[in-house]
Image (cartoon, helix red, strand yellow):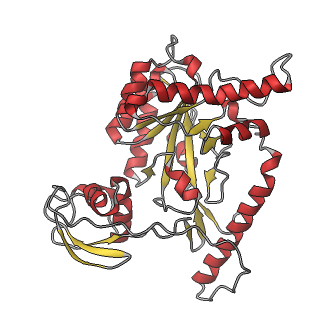
Amino acid sequence: MRTAARWAPLLAVRQAAMGAALGAALLSACGTPAPSAPAAAPPAASPPPAAPYDGPEPWPLAAGEVLGRGERLLIYLPRPGDQLPAIAARFLGSADRQWQIAEANGLQPAQATALPAGQPLVVPLMSGNSIGVRAGEFQTVPILCYHRFGNGNNKMVMSPSNFAAQLDWLARNNYSVIRLGKLAGFLAGREALPARSVVITIDDGYESVHRHAFPLLKKYGFPATLFVYTDFIGSNDGLSWSQLQEMAGSGLVDIQAHSKSHRNLVERNPGETDERYRQNIETELRAPRELLERRLGQAKVQVRHFAYPFGDASDVVLDTMARQHYQLGVTVNPGGNGFYAQPTMLRRTMIFGDLDLEGFKSKLQTSRSLSAP
């Protein structure tokens, strides 16, 4: 894996920030006030409190009573039949934030559709611990990478039964499968994430994604990001535009860019001049973004994330990422992503077809010890 040298100073700053944050967490855990730090830029502000809705009843699954509220939280008495996603949508602006209510009340995901009768809920209105630093550890978010689905001996092919077993294990063990885009707020220190957050990504755009993976994602309600290289669309093994439209329209599959042709972006073609190389890299990043947004506009697809073919990037590629307004870039360098991770060089872990369930569990790095190197 090549990490561009120009990003070394930025990575050093992020690592220094991590060290300061972790040190503060340790001092806090020991009950000793942290010493005053030299003047520095102020940290990212927490999101403002959500504005609770008190109008007529447009929330059939969140129609209970607000018993009291403050700046940071409110107390809510559910009615029979109320559900956490609707309560989160009503008070926090998004059903995706139901985990914050569950965490604040010690509820398991299974209780989201069967809330304890007559028991008030705490609804936190402000996002706390937005960088995931806790006593003794800090949060990391693994991004899983799949390619093809079906049967066979090729390690790049995941069998539907193994994929189903992996999704089932995530669901039964209280993991939160989140959208890749959620990482942007976490990395900027603006948005907290569930403690066991995992991202699912699928590369290339094989037709088997629609045939095997998509039905399982729908069964479990798990979102995924599909990185496609647009020259592959409509080929014998590739997804069709109608299949991409269907998946994007489901609200579960986010279609993003994996280049135009899947060339290795850090290697020069024979006889390729500096100027031609820069032009070709521009095309590899610009063309798929424009094409996907135009052809999938009905599903309101916006392309802001990029998967580097073969996991490689260079200074030229990273400069082009910025000009083309990409916010996140993913490699194939394994491991979890802490709050200090470089957004355009995120770690991502390959999940091969020959991996058993125990091996899969070992890939889910959702935290690291403060004492880890």
Q: Position of residue 266 (x, y in %)?
A: 78, 31
Q: In the rendered picture of this protein, how many numbered marks are placed on residues?
A: 0
Name the foreground residue: 296 vs 194: 296
The furthest residue to the bottom = 32
Displayed quadrant of residue 296: top left
Please give the name of the residue rendered at 23% of the width and 55% of the height, measured from the top-left corner. 113
Residue 118 versus residue 302 in the image, above or below: below
Above/below status of 155 relative to 21: above
Residue 256 lies, in percent from the top left, at: 53, 34
| Drawn side of residue 352 relative to residue 345, left or right | left
x then y, percent, for residue 118: 15, 72
- Note whether residue 68 is visible: yes
Residue at left offset 45%, top offset 49%: 178
Foreground of the two, 285 or 310: 285
Q: Position of residue 313 (x, y in %)?
A: 73, 37
> Is residue 228 among the parts visible in the rendering?
no
Check the image and report above or below for 243 versus 248: above
Which residue is at a point 21% across and 67% down the rendered structure image?
Answer: 54
Name the foreground residue: 343 vs 368.
343
User: In the shown orientation, is residue 105 left or right of residue 58?
Assistant: right
Please, which residue is most extreme toward the top here?
A: 236
Q: Residue at x 56, y 45 (%)?
A: 143
Q: Nearer the viewer, residue 159 or 194?
A: 194
From the image, which quarter does the C terminus lie in? bottom right
Q: Which image quarter: residue 260? A: top right
- Quadrant of the image containing the N terminus: top right
